[in-house]
Amino acid sequence: MGAEMHDASHLLPGTVVDHYQIVEILGEGGFGITYLVIDMRSGERAVLKEYFPKDVCFRQGDNTITPKKSEREIFARGLARFKEEATILARFHHPAIVKILGYFEANDTAYFIMEYEEGMDLAAYLKVHPSPLTQEEILSIMIPILEGLKEVHRHHYLHRDIKPANILLRNNNLPVLIDFGASKEAFDTTRHVTSMLTEGYAPLEQYSTDVKQQGPYTDIYAVAAVMYRMITGAVPPSAQTRSYAVLQGSEDPLVPLGYMQLSGFDGSFLYAIDRALLLKGRERPQSVQEFQHLLLGHPAAAFEPDCSVWSDMPKNTPAHTEVGMAMDSVNFFSYEGRTKRMPFLLHLVAAFLFIAGGLVLLVPTINRYTHKPSEIGVLLFLLAIVLSMWVFSAGVTKRSRDAGFSIALMIGLSLIPVVGLIVLLILLIVPSADENYDYQ
């Protein structure tokens, strides 16, 4: 009876696990506890993470962990994921990712030991410095984090719990990403989903028990939410609340940064964060590199920005004049502008090919002996038709702020090769008046 009364959610200071002595608790969540420890062999400080899913197990008086009878399978599944997490994290060698020093089992559970970093987590830092951070300050923190995240994604792994409390600012000002949430996957099909994520920083797909819906864009949403907090001082509304409001026909409660009267921020920087906070994963940047390009305003990125994020912005607001117009100004010469005028240019090429083909077909000096359409003319006609039809089908499905004009233009230009085809068929079917003429 007394053993179970010791059901403390943590190990007491002074407790020795393997050769590590507990100093204090650094953090406690639903799936594990993090301690500051002393390595009794070297005397160095380190961080010890213990697998302890408190909802499915309890701690005995001798510090062993016992799963509840009805939760043994869930406990075992989570323990396996915890071990896998330690193994995968040990592969990462990046200054922005916490370094794993070792893994061991004790007390009928598992532990892994991490390098101790002096510093303050971003959540605490933002409380101490309540004023919004500048763009330069935000980038100095988040670009290294994104570089580390790129390494994580390269190994086909996700963090799943990026938030200010999991970004540690070292005393040398270099940030590091801590507390990966992979072991939570084992509980996704049985536990309440909201206990496995952080409201405001988790995207909509994390509320689903189907982890296959998650991808790099899941972590990118969380990074953008952290940046939103750094700029506005407010945590974004939960993705579930936002989704419900949209489904009810109400406005999204998340106010885009582009709508705010913000000074000292580049338009591309604010746009990147707004886009990364879109509810649908497929509409966000699909990779860390793409998100970085957007943040830094690189026009040559291999993607097409979706300006519909700010399409409804009032034209007379400071946000539009300072930010929205910055995006509008790139319409013709930027990557976005080139992609939007590409259908028109391709139609011009198709029209030119039609004219060239028509000349080959109709100029008597070219086919003066037979007055039959030449193979070159036929080829040019067919090429013009295929090209124009392909561009038309692509253009109709392409979202654009001037979609009506674009579709009308494409329909009009697409009629050119159609008419050319009709003329071609007529010339092929109707025999030439001089086809029996003897030129000898």
Image: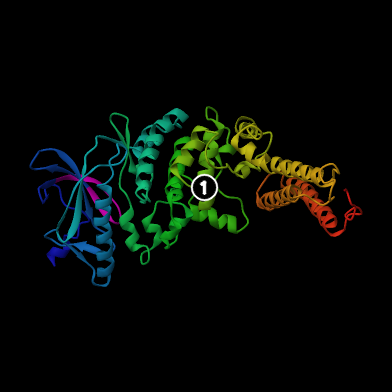
**Circle 1 sits in a helix, a strand or a loop, which is it?**
loop
State whether residue 134 is above or below residue 22.
Answer: above
What secondary structure is the magenta-colored segment mainly? Answer: strand
Residue 345, by quadrant, is: top right
Quadrant of the image containing the N terminus: bottom left
Which residue is located at x 64 percent, y 37 percent?
338
Q: In this view, does 90 lie above or below 227?
A: below
Q: Which of 187 and 90 is in front in this view?
A: 90
Q: Position of residue 86 (x, y in %)?
A: 24, 51
Give the residue drawn at x 61%, y 31%: 326
Q: Can residue 191 be seen in this view?
A: yes
Asked if residue 432 lies left or right of residue 243, the reply is: right
From the viewer's perspective, is 383 left or right of 45?
A: right
Q: Residues within 10 Å of mark 1 (few under 14, many from 20)?
A: many
Q: Quadrant of residue 130?
A: top left
Q: What is the x, y in percent for residue 286?
A: 48, 47
Q: Please state if 218 lies on the left or on the right of 439 as rendered.
A: left
**Extent of the magenta region:** 22-34
Point out residue 232 in the picture as x, y percentages from the top left corner: 49, 37
- What residue is pinned by disc 1? 284
Residue located farthest toward the front when viewing the structure as drawn: 440
Q: Which residue lies furthest to the left in this view?
A: 41
Q: Which residue lies furthest to the right in this view?
A: 433
Looking at the picture, which amino acid does disc 1 mark? Arg
425 magenta-colored: no
